Image (cartoon, grey):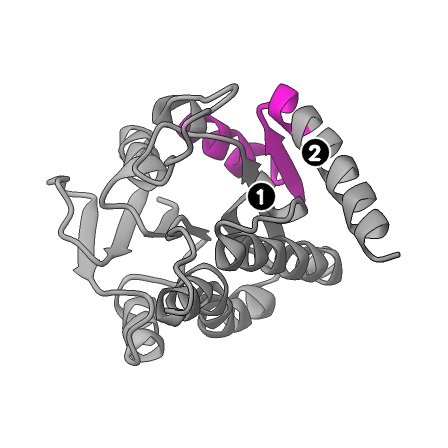
Amino acid sequence: MKKILVIGNSDGIGLATTRLLLQQGWSVTGLSRRASPISDPGYQHTVLDVSAAELRAVLSELQTSRGPFDVCLYCAGIGEPLVIPELAPEVQTVEVNLVAPLVVAEVLLPAMVQAHAGHLIVLSSMADSVLMPTAPAYGASKAGLSSYFESLGLRLRRRGVAVTNIRFGFVDTKMAKAKQRPFQVSVERAAAVVMRALRQRPLRISYPWPMAWLVAMWHWWQQWQVRWRSR
């Protein structure tokens, strides 16, 4: 029976993916800041905010008691509009979206490298390639997440360990706060994309592709604006 640690799965994509995993016979360990609605013999849940100081200790204990894990799926993420000059929420956004997944990799990766097997999956965002004046910490943290884990994946590909960065557009979760949400997909569809990543183990998935194309055009437009304003 394969073992997976899913972080950030009390709702949204993480919850929908956890249900699919259990249906397919995985042994699932969940960790999130809220209790889980799932009750299943193959499931165990730990309540912890990933920005907590004890994250390393809790992960190490789970690795010992429930692992070693074949896969770790990092779904946790936050993001709120920037309110100047109150920047504390910006710091927390970077801690949850970027620092915490690095801590997860720090704790779990050595066992995967030693076994020459394993898979790290992070859920990023197409916001990683655009400037976000209304939510700069969210965009910057996702840019860092994508850049780091894709770089890590290239470094690890000869070690038997796969890394997948999934860049979603708008998904129908509490994180989707924009008034306009082109090409929005359901959490069930997003969970199906995660399951595909488990099977195929690619370095990057951008979904849905029409949104990826739209974001690429927006990125080009923003870069032109930056160059023009820098004259």
Q: Which residue is label 2 attached to?
A: 218
Local SS, label 1: helix
- Compared across the picture, whether 13 is left or right of 129 comes to left
- Disc nearest the viewer among 2 and 1: 2
* Image mark for residue 72: none
User: What's the residue at 53%, 56% (across, down)?
Assistant: 136
Q: Main secondary structure of the magenta part?
A: helix
Is 107 placed above or below 220 here?
Answer: below
Residue 101 horizontal/vertical position (percent): 47, 63
| Segment colored magenta | 191-212
Which tag, 2 or 1, sits closer to the chain's start?
A: 1
How far apart marks 2 and 1 lie (CA) works out to: 10 Å
Is 75 left, or right, of 200 in this rendering? left
- Nearest the viewer among 92 and 132 is 132
192 is within the stretch colored magenta: yes
Residue occupying the point 28% across, 28% down = 23
Image x and y of residue 91, in percent:
42, 70
Amino acid at circle 2: Trp
Regarding mark 2 in the picture, which secondary structure is present there? Answer: helix
- The image shows residue 9 at horizontal and vertical percentages of 28, 46
Q: Amino acid at mark 1?
A: Ala
- Residue receiving disc 1: 127
